Image (cartoon, rainbow, N blue to C red):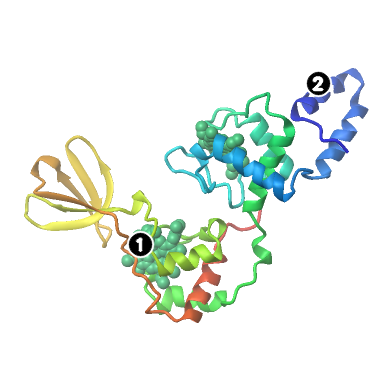
Amino acid sequence: MSRLSGAFRRRMAGCAGLGLAVLLTPATLAEDAGNLYNTAVDIRMGERYFERQCSRCHGFDATGNDETGAPDLTGRLTRGSTDVAIFNIIRDGIPGTAMLPVAADVPDPEVWQVVAYLDSLRYDPGSVVLAGNAEAGNELFWNGSDCADCHMVNGRGSRNGPDLSRVGENRTPDDLLADMVNPQENVAPRWWRLRITGPDGVSREGYRMNEDSFSLRIMDDEENLWSIPKDSLQSYERIEDSTMPGYAQTLSESELDDLVAYLFSLRREEI
Ligand code: HEC
Ligand code: HEC
């Protein structure tokens, strides 16, 4: 069966009013057949295309980019999760956003290869078998360790670190383990801190909240906000280390496994 192009489908839809509606059937069948371009070679071609055309916004590993506002494509997609929906997003773009359609002369099979590549990045979380126990991890997170001093899950906890309410959607179990064992790796600029000494001579450390021409605001560990006039700063230093301690020594392997299972279970409710 041949794959019908988006443009062809649109043309057919335009013809429907002319009594040619019956021609729409093959298009529907083609959609149901799923992606016909999903061999290992297709996936590799799709990846190459992605690196050339998409990575500047979505990032090389497709995990998104805060600056461009391009979302992470490795978890569940918000605009549609079927192959056809993803195909159409790439073919047609998302009107009114930076997500533009691919060039009209890009043949459909190439777009399907990109779909295959994106599919290869996502996987069914239900099928992942983990060594740890999510219940035990939940208990450890809230009562047996200090995670909640910094993290928030579903409105509970603290804002001294990223909100983890949906961390399981975007991080693999291996990523989550690495997050706990090597927190100093890849600290996002959002979590860099400032150490500043104000007019009172006291040195304070905190996340940079905002800044204008005249003052700088930081939030310290107790979630106090400090606003310091810039012309009175006595010292200013940026700290790119994470505040998060590494847990390789303080937690056992099975405790880390339990936490991974708990964190991996944190995702949006099924829609
Ligand atoms: C100029 C920046 C830019 C480029 C280049 C770009 N995108 Fe996007 N993309 C975006 C933005 C921004 C959004 C979010 C739009 C929105 O929903 O508001 C988006 C959304 C998407 C979505 C929907 C995500 C979801 O959660 O539903 C997919 C899929 C996608 N892009 C794939 C691609 C692919 C594949 C390419 C390369 C062919 C690409 N994008 C190139 C900026 C870009
Ligand atoms: C002192 C504060 C602090 C404590 C305690 C802490 N974290 Fe973190 N955590 C952070 C900060 C800040 C980041 C973001 C910077 C980074 O990547 O290290 C982070 C990042 C993470 C991430 C990656 C999140 C993402 O979206 O990339 C995970 C997962 C995580 N922490 C889990 C834990 C767990 C589980 C515990 C308890 C065993 C814990 N943290 C304890 C501050 C903390």
Please name the residue that numbered disc 2 is placed on.
14
Name the residue located 90 percent from the left edge and 26 percent from the top edge.
21
Please name the residue that numbered disc 1 is placed on.
184
Q: Position of residue 20 (x, y in %)?
A: 91, 23
Q: Nearer the viewer, residue 229 or 47?
A: 47
Residue 189 against residue 253 in the figure, above or below: above
Q: Nearer the viewer's eye, disc 1 or disc 2?
A: 1
Which of the two labelled residues, at mark 1 and mark 2, occupies the earlier sequence position?
Answer: 2
Q: Does dot 2 land on a helix, a strand or a loop? A: helix
Q: Quadrant of residue 266?
A: bottom right
Q: Does dot 1 land on a helix, a strand or a loop? A: loop
User: Which residue ends up furthest to the left in the rendered image?
Assistant: 200
Name the residue located 55 percent from the left edge and 66 percent from the top edge.
173
Name the residue located 62 percent from the left edge and 52 percent from the top edge.
121
Question: Can residue 20 be seen at all in this image of the molecule?
Answer: yes
> Left or right: where does residue 75 sit relative to residue 228?
right
Q: Position of residue 43 (x, y in %)?
A: 68, 47
Q: Quadrant of residue 48?
A: top right
Q: Position of residue 9 (x, y in %)?
A: 80, 28
Q: Quadrant of residue 34?
A: top right
User: Which residue ends up furthest to the top in the rendered image?
Assistant: 18
Residue 245 against residue 120 in the figure, above or below: below
Question: Can residue 152 be seen at all in this image of the molecule?
Answer: no
Disc 1 C-beta below 8 A from ligand 2: yes
Residue 88 shows which numbered tag? Answer: none
Badge 2 amino acid: Gly
Badge 1 amino acid: Gln
Give the class, few, some or many, for how many residues have Cα within 10 Å of label 1's Cα (few <14, many ≥20): some
In the rendered image, the quadrant that contains the N terminus is top right
> Marks 1 and 2, Cα distance to the nearest angstrom?
55 Å
